Amino acid sequence: MSKRGWILFVALGIIWGTPYLFIRIAVVDLSPAVVVFGRVMIAALILLPIAIHQGHARSIKTHWKGILTFAAIEMCIPFGALGVAEKEISSSLTGLLIAMVPLINAVISRQMGLDSVWDARRIIGLFVGFFGVGMLVGFDISASNYWAIILCLVAATGYALGPIIITKLLSDVASIGVIAWSLLVAGIVYLPFVTYELLNDSWRAPGVTEVSQEAILSVIALGVLCSAIAFVALFALIAEVGPTRTTVITYINPAVAIILGVIILSEPITTGIMIGFPLVLIGSVMATRRNVEAANVSAAEER
């Protein structure tokens, strides 16, 4: 990997470990719908003009079904689910649960016939990863918070399906056009919910009369840093090292989420995190390792 590739890799790994912190801060004062709406609209207002300038905005005319599907599965459902979940559970735990994405992606790819070769190591990796999540849930979650875990797993499933949707429906479209339109679609979807909350004065969290500066800045950071800049960096990294090796950033995100949660929000490093995090990380590497190796072999053969 080139120096530029390493810089992009580290930057993106850190950036996509931060959303859970910002979401956690924002939902203390704002409703999840307002947080999602602010995030996607800020990012859309940044990326859509770029897509238009580069001539990639026309993709909506011929690929609108794929874009709508991607927006719903990759943005609308996961963003909202995480916002609701983080009103109850910590940002570090949320980041760890989202680390399930490679495992879920591996299972879905297998079922869809996108990845037909499985060996004992990959199967063991799946069990290790899921066992790690079980340790997280068993040690750190009370009975009243299990629904938050379900929402996180729903979000992780959406994130796992996103790349598959791109491959199946949008592989021949410029990525920035897809992302820009998808963000705008997500904003339109959440607009009625935000409008309803504004009319009923329920756009703030219960008991909150004044929104903090931290919450506002967190929404801005979600839009600018975690969405607009992150997606631009993602496209650059894919061009530099390829899509398969790019997915390895998923292994960095949970560590960043834990560190930020502990340092900034004073979240505890629990027994569940100490046991579950290594298991999820090891399981993810084992379950997805072959894809990276196969991609490297294929790339070498093409040269």
Image (cartoon, rainbow, N blue to C red):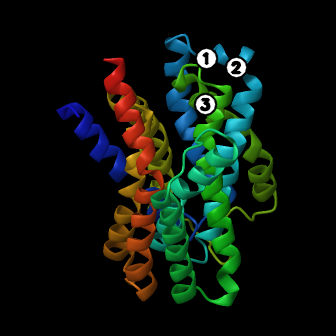
Which disc, if any, is residue 60? Answer: 2
Q: Amino acid at mark 3?
A: Thr
Give amino acid for label 1: Ala
Foreground tag (1 vs 3): 3
As measured in the structure, the alpha-carbon distance from the residue carrying label 1 to the one carrying label 3 is: 19 Å
Neighbour tally class for label 3: few under 14, some 14-19, many 20 plus, Cα within 10 Å: few
**150 to 141, vertically: above or below:** above
Quarter of the figure with residue 112: top right
Q: Residue at x 57, y 81 (%)?
A: 137
Q: Amino acid at mark 2?
A: Ile
| Residue 272, placed above or below residue 39 | below
Residue carrying label 1: 57
Element at badge 1? loop
Q: Mark 3 — residue?
A: 167
Residue 184 position in % (x across, y down): 66, 34
Q: Would residue 161 appear left or right of 25 to someone viewing this image?
A: right
